[in-house]
Image: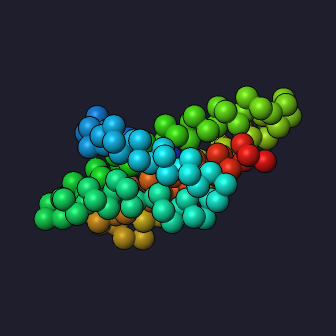
């Protein structure tokens, strides 16, 4: 298998895993979950490190996973996907708000930065499968995608304040 084909296949696998059952993932997150994460992200808008510590996983994924602890890893992965869906919406909002305040040159650099981050996120999270090659990788990939999306959302919000 060529390296290019393997990369394309791996990227497709990450995309598939990150979008699997989006309706189910979103249905696990309540309006209260969305409000809790949004409120936490706003509270720590000026402190990305504290926002990561206080807002990622503690409000949605961890409580959800505890309720589902006797279920298969794939069910717990849905908890991470639910949180990722919330953070993805926040990330997109923060990206648009940041972009609206930039000049054309900065907008191009923001776009390039975001594309590079997407490639980083996808290859980093896919590595869980590359390393483990087992069913547990599904949950680990879902957690990775949620964590990296949340970190990015917080960073883009931080950039708005500069």
Q: Where is residue 120 in the image (x, y as percent from the top left)?
A: 60, 55
State left or right for residue 43 relative to residue 128: right
Residue 68 vertical position relative to residue 38 in the rendered view, above or below: below
Question: In the image shown, does 95 or 143 lie closer to the viewer?
Answer: 95
Question: For residue 130, which quarter of the picture?
Answer: bottom left
Total marks drawn?
A: 0
Question: In the image shown, does 135 or 86 lie closer to the viewer?
Answer: 86
State left or right for residue 128 relative to residue 155: left
Q: Where is residue 37 in the image (x, y as percent from the top left)?
A: 44, 48
Question: For residue 138, which quarter of the picture?
Answer: bottom left
The residue lying at 67 percent from left, 33 percent from top is 97
The residue at the far left in this view is 70
The residue lying at 26 percent from left, 43 percent from top is 28
Q: Position of residue 65 (x, y in %)?
A: 25, 60
**Colouring mode (rainbow / by chain / secondary structure / one colour):** rainbow
The residue lying at 13 percent from left, 65 percent from top is 70
Is any atom of residue 93 visible in this view? yes
The residue lying at 41 percent from left, 47 percent from top is 36
Question: For residue 48, which quarter of the picture?
Answer: bottom right
Is any atom of residue 73 visible in this view? no
Q: Position of residue 42 (x, y in %)?
A: 56, 47
Residue 46 vertical position relative to residue 97 in the rendered view, above or below: below
State left or right for residue 110 relative to residue 123: right
The residue at the far bottom in this view is 131
């Amino acid at each position: 298998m060529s390296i290019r084909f393997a990369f394309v296949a791996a990227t497709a696998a990450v995309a598939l895993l990150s979008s699997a059952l989006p309706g189910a993932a979103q249905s696990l997150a309540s309006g209260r979950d969305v409000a809790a994460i949004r409120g936490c992200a706003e509270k720590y808008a000026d402190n990305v490190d504290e926002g990561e510590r206080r807002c990622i996983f503690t409000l949605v994924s961890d409580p959800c996973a505890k309720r589902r602890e006797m279920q298969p890893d794939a069910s717990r992965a849905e908890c991470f996907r639910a949180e990722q869906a919330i953070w993805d919406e926040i990330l997109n909002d923060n990206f648009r708000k940041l972009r609206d305040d930039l000049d054309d040159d900065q907008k191009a650099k923001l776009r390039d930065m975001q594309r590079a981050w997407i490639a980083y996120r996808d290859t980093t999270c896919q590595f869980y499968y590359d390393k483990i090659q087992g069913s547990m990788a599904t949950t680990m990939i879902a957690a990775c995608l949620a964590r990296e999306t949340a970190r990015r959302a917080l960073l883009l919000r931080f950039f708005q304040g500069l």
